């Protein structure tokens, strides 16, 4: 993290220059029972590049008025998810995991909208920017207890500093009561410590060749939506299969994982120039980021985060140019496609249909088939027939011309 960014954060902590309101949210299941409770304050400091090549820092806070669209209580094999939307396309999200005795926050993700000219004036890069990390500010907590921490804590990711305080969090609630409190070490009377800056190192993996075989089972096609308020702003349906080289007993083994749509939660954000689809399936998070270029949209970025206990790995490809269609239409491809995320992680997609912009009445627009779906049989046959016809006409012409010349010689 840049020294200047850290300096700004410390100034905010020491001088209290940024007024912050706490937001309080509850996520409930289908029986109207609370499964996630959160009450906390968050300040964000973001470094961004301007159009003239200089860097600026902007600080802002999560307001007290937020919405939690896309949040989920989870299921037996799907982790609970807390989504907090605020401002112009900003999204703060936290996944939870547990074992027999305790639970904790796992993946912490913050998406901000660099196209917001109020927060990011003269930003060079526009659109949604995603910052994901394995959270460490939320320590393991005994089940049926609330995590509480009045002291501030700091989480850093590239170009982003997040500062938390007055935190109350609880997940996996099994009754109507919030339960007893689990106090963070910074709040204990015997503990005196200054805020700690946390960073996460992504475990390195050994590069191995692309897998030559895939399992025979084909993933089920899931239907996914993203809401902007009460309106559907993104629609997608697809089957997804991840192929990753994972370290198993000291060896890299190619492992296939089908994304089960029944146990997958969809969320994201929609902007004027970018749109994000986030799919959360247990210990796997897949993010698709779409951009607008001229009058078309396309898939430009993919991020995949895989969790293994307390460890995780995150792979990203920021330079894709896939799934392109005209604005107002949807992209359709029935053929299997391969998306290269990294040298040791691939995504196989099946029966893809997606539209991240300009939906009308929450339905897909006219489908534009991908190149793989186009049927070239008829054009080839027609072209071949025209070619044969042209050759016959030319042969007839030369024969007729030759006969006329011969007739002319005989006349003389």
Image (spheres, rainbow, N blue to C red):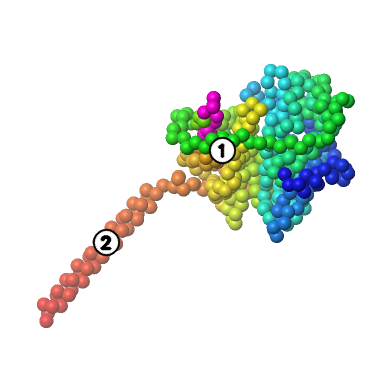
Q: Quadrant of residue 226?
A: top right
Label 1: few (<14), some (14–19) or many (≥20) C-alpha neighbours in 10 Å: some
The stretch in magenta equals 243-251
Query: Residue beneath label 2, please?
Result: 391
Q: Which residue is mark 1?
A: 237
Q: Residue 333 in the image: x percent, y percent?
A: 50, 43
For the N terminus, the image quarter is top right
Residue 223 lies left or right of residue 170; in this view the side is left
Give percent across and percent down for residue 382.
Answer: 35, 54
Q: Residue at x 52, y 37 (%)?
A: 207
Q: Residue at x 85, y 27 (%)?
A: 191
Q: Which mark is residue 381?
A: none
Q: Is residue 382 left or right of residue 77?
A: left
Q: Is residue 244 magenta?
A: yes
Quadrant in which the C terminus is drawn: bottom left
Return the x and y of residue 140 as percentages of the image width and height.
Answer: 74, 25
State how far apart marks 2 and 1 are (Cα).
Answer: 48 Å
Residue located 61% across and 37% down the image: 314
Residue 61 visible in the picture: no
Q: Assign the magenta stretch its main secondary structure.
A: strand
Q: Secondary structure at mark 1?
A: strand
Image point 59% across, 46% down: which residue?
318
């Amino acid at each position: 993290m840049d020294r200047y960014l850290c300096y700004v954060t410390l100034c905010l902590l020491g001088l209290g220059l940024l007024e912050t309101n706490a937001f309080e949210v509850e996520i409930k299941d289908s029986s109207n029972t609370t499964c996630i409770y959160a009450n906390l304050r968050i300040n964000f400091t973001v470094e961004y590049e301007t159009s003239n090549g200089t860097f600026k820092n902007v600080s802002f806070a999560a307001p007290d008025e937020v919405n939690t669209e896309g949040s989920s209580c989870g299921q037996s094999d799907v982790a609970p998810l807390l989504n907090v939307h605020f401002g112009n396309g900003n999204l703060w999200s936290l996944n939870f995991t547990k074992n027999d005795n305790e639970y904790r926050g796992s993946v912490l993700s913050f998406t901000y909208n660099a196209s917001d000219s109020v927060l990011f004036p003269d930003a060079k890069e526009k659109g949604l920017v995603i910052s994901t990390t394995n959270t460490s500010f939320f320590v393991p907590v005994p089940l049926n207890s609330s995590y509480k921490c009045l002291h501030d804590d700091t989480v850093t990711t590239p170009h982003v500093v997040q500062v938390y305080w007055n935190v109350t969090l609880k997940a996996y609630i099994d009754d109507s009561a919030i339960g007893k409190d689990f106090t963070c070490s910074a709040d204990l009377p015997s503990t005196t410590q200054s805020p700690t800056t946390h960073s996460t190192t992504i475990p390195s993996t050994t590069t191995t060749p692309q897998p030559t075989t895939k399992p025979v089972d084909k993933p089920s096609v899931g239907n996914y939506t993203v809401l902007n308020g009460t309106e559907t702003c993104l629609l997608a349906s697809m089957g997804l299969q991840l192929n990753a080289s994972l370290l198993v007993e000291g060896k890299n083994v190619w492992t296939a994982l089908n994304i089960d749509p029944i146990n997958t939660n969809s969320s994201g954000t929609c902007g004027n120039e970018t749109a994000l689809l986030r799919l959360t399936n247990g210990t796997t998070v897949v993010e698709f980021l779409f951009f607008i270029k001229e009058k078309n949209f396309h898939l430009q970025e993919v991020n995949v985060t895989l969790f293994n206990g307390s460890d995780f790995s995150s792979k990203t490809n920021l330079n894709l140019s896939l799934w392109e269609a005209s604005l107002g239409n949807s992209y359709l491809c029935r053929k299997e496609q391969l998306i290269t995320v990294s040298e040791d992680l691939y995504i196989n997609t099946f029966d893809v249909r997606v539209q991240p912009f300009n939906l009308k009445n929450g339905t897909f627009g006219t489908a534009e088939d991908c190149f793989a779906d186009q049927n070239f049989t008829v054009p080839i046959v027609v072209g071949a027939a025209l070619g044969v016809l042209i050759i016959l006409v030319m042969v007839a012409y030369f024969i007729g011309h030759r006969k006329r010349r011969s007739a002319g010689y005989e006349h003389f």
